[in-house]
Image (cartoon, rainbow, N blue to C red):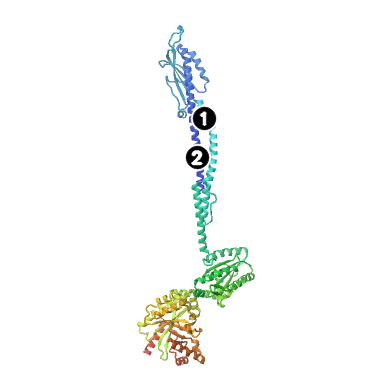
Amino acid sequence: MTHLNAWLYRVLLISLLAGGLSGLSLFFNIEIDHRLKEADQQARALAELLADASAPLVYLQNQSGLLSLLKATAHWEDPLTVSIYDSSCRLQFNWPPNGSAVACRSGSSLAWRDFWTLSPPTVVHAVPIAAPVAPAEVGLLGTAKETIGYLVLRRQLVGLRREVWALFSASLIPLLAVSLLIWLLAARLLDRLIVRPLLELEKSLEAVTQGQDAEISEFSPIAEIAFAQRGFNELSRWLKAYRERIEKLAFYDGLTGLGNRTLLREQIQKHMSLSRRQGFSLALILLDLDHFKRVNDTLGHRSGDLLLAEIAQRLKRCTRAEDLVVRLGGDEFVIVLLALSQNLAQAHTQALAVVEKLSAVLNQPIRLGEYDLTTTGSLGVALFPHDAEDFETLFQCADTAMYQAKERGRNAFCFFHQSTSLPSRERLSLEAALRRAVERGELEFVLQPQVCYPQGCPVGAEALLRFRFHGEPVPPSEFIPMLEESGLIYPATEWLVQTLLTYKQRWQAQGLCGQLKRLAVNLSPVQLWRPDLADRLLKAIEGMEDVVLEFELTESALLQPTPQILETLEALRRKNVRLAIDDFGTGYSNLAHLRHLPVDVLKIDQAFVRDLANPRTRALVEAIVALGRALALEVVAEGIETAAQAECLGRLGCPVMQGFYFAPPMTPEAFAGYLRQRVAACG
């Protein structure tokens, strides 16, 4: 735009100068034409005057008289040449004597164009010299005259050209001054009406392209430019609103209005740099709500969202305006306390006061509809720069401390210490390896037979997941909760069912199934809350026609079955899937619910089996067996390790047993060998 302005001013100046010079040229051409006519008339009048005066002298051929007469023209500024001819055009006299004669009876006039092209410009007039016819002695002068010769006058307009040049030079400077003045006025007007509005529009456009806000306040009087300016303002306001919306979506959580992970990463880097320069420290608090999934599963996601929004507001009220409160996602929040003391002990005390306030606020009941919910949270705290000097490490430290708080029983907080980082890092590595094993189908499983008593023939088997980390087995009590918390329990169960199907088909082709009627797989309580559980499991067991699949559910998971859970169980039953209540008798069984549950099997917990020497325990086991018989449910006892336990259960009427006394859990290959032996023994 700057180059355009310069060219506009140049074009304007050149146009003004060209116009001025054109006007000046036209004026002078008109003036020259007028002066030429005057000069021509003067020359003709002089020629006629000389012709009249020289007629008697020519007639008398008085050369001296002619010389005296023509000397009188010497006072003329312009050079004059006078040639006198007789009637036959023979030269009789020439002035000046040494000059060239002018042709007889020649004549010319000048136009303004000739004034500039001829050098010098010249006018020529030929006038006849006439004398009276009557004799002088009569005393009467007759009117008739005869031509006795010709006078030719040539005038070179040297003085006129000098006058014109002087006049032109004198007029040029005022013309330039007037042109410059007009140019300045026009440039100022052009600048106000066009240039400045366009420059402002250009700067505003550049600001908008750089993500800044810009709006034009002063509009040009020119309608077209004003229209463009107003259009730009509309576009700028629209872009501003759109940019704010994008920024909100990019940096803020739509549910709670808090910042998100992206905003946290951007802001904390800035505050870390500021803290280094100013000598402050800051605290990063990682908050994970305890058992939040239960709220979503029991009351629905709408209630869970309302709970998160209320907790977000409470966290904001517990912190200062300059502190950062963000939601990472799900039920995780981060609070960054800024401008803490550089002294470690003082910074620890300042952060502790806020953490205690947060814990107290989280424990206050929250009213959601007709429910009063009390939430708790596990908080991990890490201090910058004492625990870490970059964001990633600082976040890992806070995460490690948060897991330490969970291991202490939840509803707790923990400050990071270097001594606590190793177990948490091992846990992270374990979780990563577990995820890879699920995604790649690298989990393992074992099978423990279920036999009929006293024959000992296998009628079923329970499949149990196993996982190895760096070649060493990981206890199920460690990796099963990880599967549940991460949601990997769903694909892991589906993998187990599909793998069982593969082995079952292989055993059936080898004739090893015999009396084997069921393969049992454990279902986690968290899986029951998934609406599509039945569809996914039924899709996984397609093709298992001859061996009935059995899913084992813990008694605690069925204490208060919701309509959704009952619908899932009924859908599985309709597809010939058996359901068993695992660990029956340990979960404060509600017999009223038992009437309506679509189950087929009751599994007596091994805690009762180990205590069969107690008469009360034997009475409870006998009651469970009688209850199962009365409800037409099959009863299975698990955890049998001795012959005495097996005999006692047999006397109490338990028909199916499972435990190390009969067979330990074994790999699928070993289980195939076991089946081969038992089929031969049982026939």
* Marks 1 and 2, how far apart at CA: 23 Å
Crowdedness near tag 2: few (<14), some (14–19) or many (≥20) residues, C-alpha within 10 Å? some
* Type of the residue with mark 1: Trp
Furthest-front residue in this view: 370
Q: Is residue 296 visible?
A: yes
Give the mark nearest the N terminus, 1 or 2. Answer: 2
Pair 1/2: label in front = 2
The amino acid type of the residue labelled 2 equals Ile
Relative height, residue 504 to residue 24 (above, below)? below
Q: Quadrant of the C terminus?
A: bottom left
Q: Position of residue 438 (x, y in %)?
A: 45, 75
Give the residue drawn at x 58%, y 64%.
271
- On the question of residue 388 being in view, the answer is no
Work out whether residue 559 or residue 502 is closer to the camera in this orientation and state it.
559
Q: Is residue 449 left or right of residue 283?
A: left
Residue 90 pos. (x, y %)? 42, 16
Q: Residue under label 1, please give it.
A: 165
Q: Quadrant of residue 681?
A: bottom left
Report x, y in % for residue 442: 44, 76
Circle 2 sits on which residue? 14
* Neighbours of disc 1 within 10 Å: few (<14), some (14-19), many (20+): few
- x, y (%) of residue 602? 45, 85
Query: Mark on residue 421?
Result: none
Element at label 1: helix
Does 322 appear above or below 552?
above
Using the image as rendered, state which of residue 333 and residue 128 is in the foreground: 333
Outermost residue to the top:
137
Residue that appears at 50% across and 87% down:
607
